Amino acid sequence: MKKPTAKIREEIARLQEKLKEAETRDAERIGRIAIRAGLGEIETEEADLLSAFEEVAGRFREGTKPAQGRKPAGDSA
């Protein structure tokens, strides 16, 4: 039995709202972590931050993340 197009549109709208809410939760979580890491105090271009975030995301996808709460080897601070 086929669903009426109105039902499908309602379902799509509901799913889009759920996606928006999930993205907001993710953004808030990442934002809190970034602030705790001190990124809120750094004056830099958004493109530079995006590049750095992409690098970190790539490391996590590859499974080469540093130990929790520690800086990667070779970083001096």
Image: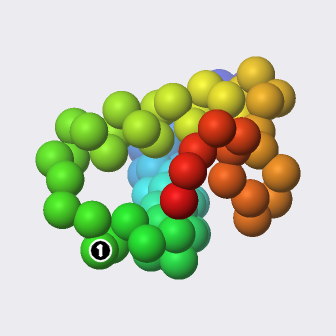
Q: Is residue 59 above or below residue 75?
A: above
Residues 37 and 28: in front is: 37
Q: Residue at x 78, y 30 (%)?
A: 64
Where is residue 48? Give x, y as percent. Answer: 26, 39
What colour scheme was applied to this rendering of the protein?
rainbow
Q: Residue extending furthest top?
A: 62
Give above or below for 15 relative to 68: above
Q: Residues within 10 Å of mark 1 (few under 14, many from 20)?
A: few
Give the quarter of the image for residue 65. top right
Decide which of 73, 60 is in the foreground and name it: 73
Please tell me whether residue 26 is drawn above or below residue 8 in the rendered image: below
Instruction: Classify 51 as above or below 33.
Output: above
Res. 21 in view: no
Residue 62 appears in the picture as rendered: yes
Where residue 38 appears, as percent x and y from the top left, is 43, 72
3 relative position to 19: left or right: right
Disc count in the image? 1
Relative placement, left or right, of 57 versus 1 is: left
Most foreground residue, 58 or 69: 69
Is the N terminus in the top left, top right, bottom left or bottom right quadrant?
Answer: top right
Disc 1 element: helix
User: Which residue carries the number 1 mark?
Assistant: 41
User: At 61% from the left edge and 26% from the top edge, which residue is drawn?
Assistant: 58
Q: Amino acid at mark 1?
A: Glu
The residue drawn where x is 46% and y is 50% is: 16
- Hey, which quadrant is residue 39 in on the image? bottom left
